[in-house]
Image: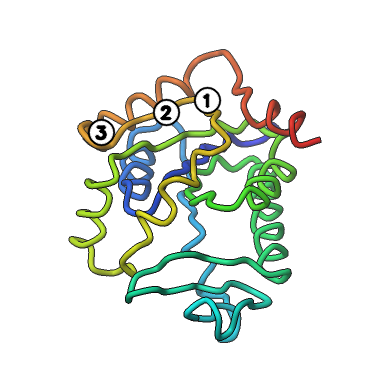
C-alpha cells in the first residue's frame, strides 16, 4: 500500500493555519483527514500543562506556560513534553503509512520538536507549508478570537520560521484562505516530490 500524503502546516498562533487547513481539506481531489496538536490536548493529564511566572515553578516535566503581565511569554518543554511530541509525530507517521492522506497543523517554536517531526516523517511524502502573516494582523486575529491566551502570536512569531525552509509558503496577511489553499494544492499536485523534510533530516543528522 502506498503511503498517504502529509501536508504539514506551520506558523505562529492565530496566523490562519486552521482556516487554511479546512479550506484545503474541502478543495483537495482526494480525501484528507485534518489533524492538529490541539486535538491531542484532550488527552493531557491535569499536571502536564503548568502555568507559571517563570520562577515559581521554573520548569515542568511536561509543558510550562510562562505568563508575564497577563500575556503568554514563553512555553518551556520538559522531558515528558518531548516524549509527547515524539509520540504524536510517530502516530502521524502511522496514519500516513496506513495509506491515509492527512493535513496537520503545528507551531514549531522549539527546534527539538521539529527534529522529532522530521525524524518520524522524513521518509514519507511531506509537504512542509509555511504560513506567513504580519504580526499586527495575527495579534488582531488573536484578540478577535478570544479563545487563546494573549501573547501567543508575538511569542512564537520570531521562532516558528527559524529553520528557514519550506516546500511551499503562503501569506495570509492579504490572501484569502481559498487563495492560499489553491497555492498549496498546486504545489502538492506537481509531479515533483517534496524535498524539505529530507533536507532537514540530513542537516539534523
Q: Nearer the viewer, residue 87 or 107?
A: 107
Rounded to the nearest angstrom, the CA distance separating label 3 from label 2 is: 14 Å
11 versus 76 height, above or below? above
Quarter-of-image position of residue 195: top right
N-terminal of the two: label 1 or label 3?
1
In the displayed structure image, the side of residue 118 where residue 56 appears, left or right: left
Which is more foreground, mark 1 or mark 3? 1
Residue indicated by mark 1:
167
Q: Residues within 10 Å of mark 3 (few under 14, many from 20)?
A: some
**Secondary structure at numbered mark 1:** loop
Rounded to the nearest angstrom, the CA distance separating label 1 from label 3 is: 19 Å
Residue indicated by mark 3:
178
Q: Residues within 10 Å of mark 2 (few under 14, many from 20)?
A: some
Residue indicated by mark 2:
169
- Which residue is at 50% across, 47% downward? 159
- Which residue is at 51% across, 37% downward? 7
Question: Which quadrant, please, contains the C terminus?
Answer: top right
Which is more foreground, mark 3 or mark 2? 2
**Secondary structure at numbered mark 3:** helix
Amino acid at each position: 500500500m502506498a503511503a498517504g500524503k502529509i501536508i504539514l502546516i506551520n506558523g505562529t498562533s492565530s496566523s490562519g493555519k486552521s482556516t487554511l487547513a479546512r479550506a484545503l481539506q474541502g478543495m483537495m481531489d482526494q480525501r484528507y483527514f485534518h489533524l492538529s496538536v490541539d486535538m491531542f490536548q484532550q488527552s493531557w493529564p491535569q499536571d502536564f500543562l503548568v502555568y507559571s511566572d517563570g520562577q515559581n515553578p521554573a520548569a515542568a516535566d511536561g509543558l510550562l506556560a510562562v505568563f508575564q503581565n497577563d500575556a503568554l511569554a514563553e512555553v518551556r518543554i520538559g522531558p515528558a513534553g518531548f516524549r509527547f511530541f515524539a509520540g504524536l509525530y510517530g502516530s502521524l507517521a502511522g496514519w500516513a503509512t496506513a495509506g491515509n492522506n492527512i493535513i496537520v497543523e503545528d507551531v514549531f517554536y522549539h527546534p527539538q520538536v521539529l527534529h522529532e517531526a522530521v525524524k518520524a516523517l522524513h521518509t514519507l511524502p511531506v509537504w512542509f507549508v509555511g504560513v506567513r502573516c504580519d504580526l499586527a494582523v495575527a495579534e488582531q486575529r488573536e484578540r478577535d478570537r478570544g479563545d487563546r491566551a494573549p501573547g501567543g502570536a508575538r511569542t512564537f512569531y520570531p521562532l516558528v520560521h527559524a529553520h528557514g525552509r519550506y516546500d511551499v509558503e503562503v501569506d495570509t496577511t492579504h490572501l484569502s484562505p481559498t487563495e492560499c489553499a489553491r497555492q498549496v494544492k498546486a504545489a502538492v499536485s506537481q509531479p515533483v516530490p517534496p524535498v524539505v523534510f529530507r533536507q532537514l533530516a540530513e542537516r539534523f543528522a
